[in-house]
Amino acid sequence: MSEAVTRSVHSASTSPGLLASLDPLLREWLPRQRWFAGKGRPVTGFSLVAAVEVLPLDAKLGLLHLLVRAHQPLVPTQSAATHPADCYQLLIGVRETLPPRLAPALIGRPTEGPLAGRTVYEALYDARPADVLLEALRSRARIGDLRFERDMRQEIRDGLVPRLVTAEQSNSSIVYGDTFILKLLRRIVPGDNPDLELPLVLAREGCPRVPAPAGWLLADLADETYVLGVLQPFVQGAADGWELALSELAKGEDFSGEARALGRATAEVHMALARALPTVTMGRGQLELLVDGMTERLEAAAQAVPALRPYAPGLHTAFEALADLAGEGETWTAQRIHGDLHLGQCLRSPSGEWSLIDFEGEPSKPLAERRMPQPTARDVAGMLRSFDYAAHSHAPVVPGWADTCRAAYCSGYAEAGGRDPRTDPVLLRAYETDKAIYEVVYEARHRPDWLPVPMEAVRRLALSGSS
Ligand SMILES: Nc1ncnc2c1ncn2[C@@H]1O[C@H](COP(=O)(O)OP(=O)(O)O)[C@@H](O)[C@H]1O
Ligand SMILES: O=P(O)(O)O[C@H]1O[C@H](CO)[C@@H](O[C@H]2O[C@H](CO)[C@@H](O)[C@H](O)[C@H]2O)[C@H](O)[C@H]1O
């Protein structure tokens, strides 16, 4: 372990005073972060879950690792018992003054408490704290409650130059020397996070479609463990499926070869997960619960987005058809899946190999729900929707482009040994409908300009049951 890391194991005895001095600054700064999950409601205060001085705060450069709960007014459907305040991972750097290159990282200058008069900032912009994190992973350090782990079979060289990824993300990532990428989870929950769990399982299973975790960061608090970060090999020169699909569309090129390869990659991942982790048969009771969930989401969405209401009866038929099949005794296998699959979660290396990333699932859902076995049709439906999105992002829409990609994706899935998704049209339509409804709500909230894209799918899906 490097001297910097061993020297840095400090007690956090001063942390309550620290949090009080940071409180007014964090109330301003936190809601402005892309990864802040509680947008639209003010932060009314913080409580400390854990604090570790990774680098001593009285040094020229201090580094504080905080897990804090951000308190916000509950929305009417929530209760404090079922909706604890969100817990965030923060890495706070402390310096006398910030060099100009770190200006975008500024959080502020506390006016009282142990940090009065110093400058606090988002430490991930700064190479030195980023180095400390990699060094701690390399050396499997224990720093206070923080446990840095690694896979000793993967070499992690020292001196890899860090850079913060500036893309819009739900979390924060640092790339080290174009060799590794460390994703630090921002809104954290106790328990096995699928973003670490599933890539580890897939690596053990020998599935090359997912970058194998080289290191991971955990916090052991009371009797609960939190996953805070995952280090994975960086796919150099990769383009994501969304960028590629749009650029091929712009050039008038066919994307069906890539769609087929993506289908194969998805099937390989699904089959590896089914080998490694338990699968269950979904019978009548479970399918009815699935249909109930989809129906409730449709009703809530129609409340939230009035444009959806005329299509609700047609959309309901997709769920009723699934309920009918369940009533007739149809069953499906459920297994662990990706849970939030779309073109942006697929990376193609310069040699043409596809990898899947970001197994966190839908971050807004509880961990237990995200880790439940589900039919693979859910991931497939996510990808089918994504081809449709890509086609509609290009003007004019190229007739047949999405259909060709969707068919090629399903063929690729079947060629690799997966069950052809088109064998289960009722299940697929139900999942596609559920996803399009989710997208309508997402776009209405976040990107109203994009709302016509899922609305077009809603029109098509609402009609498809009536033929
Ligand atoms: N192993 C990797 N190799 C190359 N780039 C990656 C890798 N993992 C993630 N990325 C890049 O980082 C971005 C964010 O990663 P992701 O896991 O989706 O984070 P988030 O959960 O914050 O959205 C991706 O869109 C991709 O561009
Ligand atoms: O950021 P996440 O990966 O958690 O996903 C959210 O944002 C996505 C948009 O960035 C959104 O995806 C939708 O738009 C994509 C194109 O931008 C398209 O490829 C997807 O198929 C479509 O669902 C996703 O729904 C939302 O959860």
Image: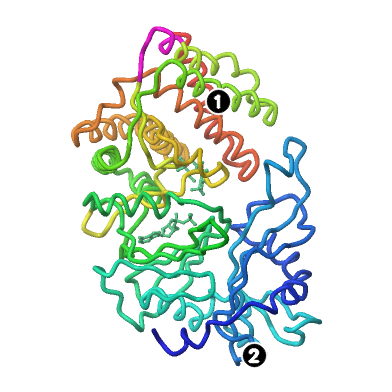
Q: Residue at x 45, y 66 (%)?
A: 217
Mark 1 or 2: in front is 2
Instruction: Give how far across and how far down residue 213 sits, in percent.
Output: 34, 61
Point out the quarter of the image occupied by ligand 1: bottom left
Alpha carbons under labels 1 and 2: distance apart: 53 Å
Determine which residue is flagged by label 1: 293
Determine which residue is flagged by label 2: 58
Q: How is the image coloured?
A: rainbow
The answer to which of 4 and 429 lies nearer the viewer is: 4
The answer to which of 241 and 297 lies nearer the viewer is: 297
The answer to which of 213 and 56 lies nearer the viewer is: 56
Residue 326 painted magenta: yes
Instruction: Give how far across and how far down residue 121 sits, in percent.
Output: 64, 77
Q: Quadrant of residue 154?
A: bottom left
The answer to which of 388 and 128 lies nearer the viewer is: 128
Q: What's the magenta region?
A: 324-331
Q: Earlier in the sequence, mark 1 or mark 2?
A: 2
